[in-house]
Amino acid sequence: MLPQEIIDVLESRLQDEYNNERFYKNASKWCDLNGWKCASDYFVCMMHKSHHLAHRLERYANDANTSIESPIVEQVSIVVNSYVDIIDMAYNNEVAYFNSYSENMEKCTNAAFEIFLEKYVKSHQKSVYNFLEMINKLSGISGNFELRQMQKKVFTRH
């Protein structure tokens, strides 16, 4: 059985990962509906990544013979004008998740759990970097035609 402080962290981060999964699903759908195929495919990959991270959190608890509360996934609606808005939102989300995991890791007193959390810190750090790189590539581009031209360059897999 895991200590309550670890259970609390797992439940909180599980909520974040499922919310993130829903965000990326909605982002993908928006891009699909608006003709941004490369962007849609990228966000589908991010959705699967978030789902995998959530599953690993659940498995960590299960492996320790501990049950954790399944989160209620919030309805995530996104109101955007272009996929650039989605990239900004994704960047801000990933920064928040990176900070949450980093804070949990700093407060952690269990060495094994700290090592487990480090994988999440690195995963979200990579996402922050990738979205920041996308933002930098898109800075100064204003027209829809220019955005369409940049789409393949922006949404290359890292």
Image: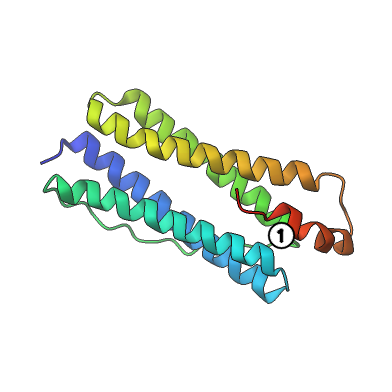
Percent x, y for residue 130? 62, 43
Q: Residue at x 34, y 45 (%)?
A: 12
Percent x, y for residue 132? 67, 40
Q: Could you tell me which secondary element the residue under label 1 belongs to?
A: helix
Colouring mode (rainbow / by chain / secondary structure / one colour): rainbow
Question: Hey, what amino acid is under mark 1?
Answer: Tyr
**Image quadrant where residue 31 sits:** bottom right
Whether residue 77 can be seen here? no
Percent x, y for residue 115? 31, 31
**Image quadrant where residue 105 sits:** top left
Of residues 139 and 122, the one nearer the viewer is 122
Whether residue 131 is situated above or below residue 118 in the rendered picture: below
Whether residue 107 can be seen here? yes
Q: Residue at x 88, y 54 (%)?
A: 142
Q: Residue at x 43, y 61 (%)?
A: 74
Q: Circle 1 sits on which residue? A: 83
Q: Relative to residue 125, is residue 41 drawn left or right?
A: right
Query: Residue lying furthest bottom in this view?
Result: 33
Whether residue 47 is situated above or below residue 53 in the rendered picture: below
Q: Relative to residue 120, is residue 30 drawn left or right?
A: right
- Quadrant of the rendering where the N terminus is positioned: top left
Count of numbered badges drawn on the protein: 1
* Few, some or many residues within 10 Å of mark 1 (<14, 14–19, 20+): some
Q: Relative to residue 23, is residue 155 drawn left or right?
A: right
Percent x, y for residue 47? 49, 60
